[in-house]
Image: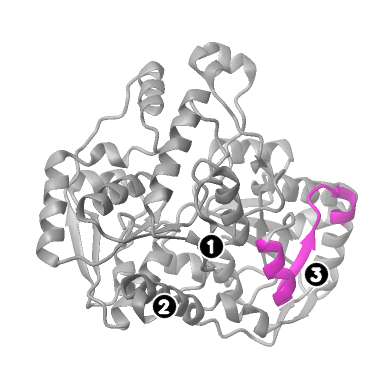
């Protein structure tokens, strides 16, 4: 698990939960992660040492040194670096033969019985596949996201796409069990790799970091009783705008790129919410001085451009990156929280972001500009928010106006949340590990 505290990224929390669950069940858990060198810390903006307090003290954290690799200094070098690295991230390039020998020695001295790897970063699954073969160990791969099926940005070339798909299949074939966070994501892997036994795949939902004790009702006081309303969003939008043809011509290597037409990630961006908000201000100008959107995260250029395009400069407040505890505290100051999802041509969207559980913990209603899929299902079933159709701007505008002016009183269905609670997902994962290590007992 190379992504581990004090690194503060979304993927660490599921790994910490599972590691803690196994330690509490009596397993000797050894977590392999990156050495906290000055160079590494300088390169990582998202460091939060308080997150180490989440880790069970009985877990043995082993930090290994990795090579420093200077990034390419021109577009040709960048293209070559991307093209030759089939895994899709550069972490594996940092793992030298010396580091591998260090890992091999560690594994022999600790008498490892089972390998677990959680991805992304996906290059770790390549290392895990090698170690599983070398030491003849069972391997559980936790796929928190799509790999070859991740379509937010294009592949460097069609040849590259085929090589990554081959590498993905090789890794999945070696795995004893493959876990993932939604049925929709599992189906995407199955569709891409029909050669892999479907029995290998196991669903273990994403979950909050502690048991959620929800209020019976989520309430919003409308603008009929208050002067200002604040809507918030925390974290990345996972969107990169497509490169225009004229820009591709300036960098000819982009002409070789291959884009899978599976998802439209513009729906994951705030575009459709901004469009609705802008239309609302056009129809009801008085609301422009009462409704504000807060973004907790580093605003990329495309976000700034989107804000300008919809004339929302006076209504969007960017707070920048905040530490985990500070972000949770800030969310409690908001009246509503925004959720978005990708739109897919294959069935439903497949992502269930962990931020949705932080939203629930805040007891704030959710403005869900989402398509069909697991995120929409959770919000509807728990009855914790209002669903907007991103494609229907006029309908969404009227629904947003009614919501913010008149307020909300949502009766929460706590039973619908039980399968996502940490006790349920930790139990499922621990039972799975027990079954892999001691198959004769089941």
Rounded to the nearest whole Å, what is the CA distance between mark 3 and mark 2?
A: 49 Å
- The segment highlighted magenta reads 374-397
Circle 2 Cα neighbour tier, 10 Å, few/some/many (<14 / 14–19 / ≥20): some
Nearest the eye: 126 or 255? 126
Nearest the eye: 408 or 30? 30
Q: Nearer the viewer, mark 3 or mark 2?
A: 2
Q: Reading the chain from its start, which is encountered first: label 2 or label 1?
A: 1
Quadrant in the picture for residue 363: bottom right
What SS does tag 2 mark? helix
Circle 1 Cα neighbour tier, 10 Å, few/some/many (<14 / 14–19 / ≥20): many
Nearest the eye: 376 or 272? 376
Q: Nearer the viewer, mark 3 or mark 1?
A: 1
Residue 128 in view, yes or no: yes
Quadrant in the picture for residue 367: bottom right
Q: In the image, which disc is placed on residue 431?
A: 2
Q: Reading the chain from its start, which is encountered first: label 3 or label 1?
A: 1
From the top left corner, tell me how far across and down residue 344 is, in percent.
69, 46
Q: Which residue is mark 3?
A: 223
From the top left corner, tell me how far across and down residue 111 is, in percent.
15, 66
What SS does tag 3 mark? loop
Q: In the image, is 3 to the left or to the right of 413?
A: left
Residue shown at the point (56%, 75%) measured from the top left: 420
Q: Which residue is mark 1?
A: 181
Rounded to the nearest whole Å, what is the CA distance between mark 3 and mark 1?
A: 38 Å
């Amino acid at each position: 698990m190379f992504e581990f505290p004090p690194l503060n990224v979304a993927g660490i929390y599921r790994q910490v939960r599972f590691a803690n669950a196994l330690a509490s069940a009596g397993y000797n858990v050894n977590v392999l992660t990156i050495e906290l060198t000055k160079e590494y810390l300088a390169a990582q903006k998202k460091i939060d040492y308080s997150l180490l307090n989440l880790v069970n003290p009985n877990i043995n954290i082993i930090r290994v040194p990795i090579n420093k690799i200077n990034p390419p200094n021109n577009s040709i070098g960048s293209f070559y670096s991307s093209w030759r690295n089939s895994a899709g991230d550069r972490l594996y390039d940092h793992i030298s033969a010396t580091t591998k020998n260090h890992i091999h020695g560690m594994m022999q001295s600790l008498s490892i019985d089972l390998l677990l790897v959680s991805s992304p970063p996906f290059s770790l699954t390549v290392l895990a596949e090698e170690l599983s073969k070398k030491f003849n160990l069972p391997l559980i791969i936790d796929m928190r996201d799509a790999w070859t099926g991740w379509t937010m940005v294009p592949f460097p070339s069609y040849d590259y796409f085929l090589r990554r798909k081959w590498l993905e299949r090789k890794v999945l074939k070696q795995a004893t069990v493959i876990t993932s966070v939604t049925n929709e994501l599992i189906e995407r892997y199955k569709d891409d790799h029909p050669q892999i036994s479907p029995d290998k795949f196991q669903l273990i939902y994403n979950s909050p970091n502690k048991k959620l004790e929800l209020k019976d009702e989520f309430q919003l006081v409308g603008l009929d009783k208050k002067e200002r309303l604040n809507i918030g969003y925390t974290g990345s939008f996972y969107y990169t705008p497509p490169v225009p043809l004229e820009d591709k011509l300036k960098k000819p290597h982009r002409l070789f790129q291959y884009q899978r037409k599976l998802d439209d990630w513009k729906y994951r961006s705030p575009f459709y919410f901004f469009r609705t908000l802008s239309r609302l201000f056009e129809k009801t100008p008085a609301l422009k001085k009462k409704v504000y959107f807060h973004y907790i995260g580093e605003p990329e250029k495309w976000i700034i451009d989107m804000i300008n395009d919809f004339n929302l400069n006076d209504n969007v407040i960017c707070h920048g990156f905040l530490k985990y505890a500070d972000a949770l505290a800030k969310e409690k100051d908001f009246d509503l929280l925004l959720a978005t999802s990708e739109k897919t041509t294959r069935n439903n969207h497949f992502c269930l972001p962990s931020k949705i559980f932080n939203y629930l913990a805040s007891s704030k209603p959710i403005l869900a500009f989402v398509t069909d899929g697991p995120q929409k299902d959770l919000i509807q079933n728990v009855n914790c928010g209002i669903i907007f159709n991103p494609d229907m701007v006029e309908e969404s505008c009227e629904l947003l106006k009614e919501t913010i002016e008149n307020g909300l009183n949502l009766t929460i269905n706590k039973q619908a949340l039980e399968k996502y609670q940490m006790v349920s997902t930790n139990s499922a994962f621990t039972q799975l590990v027990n079954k892999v290590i001691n198959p004769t007992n089941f």
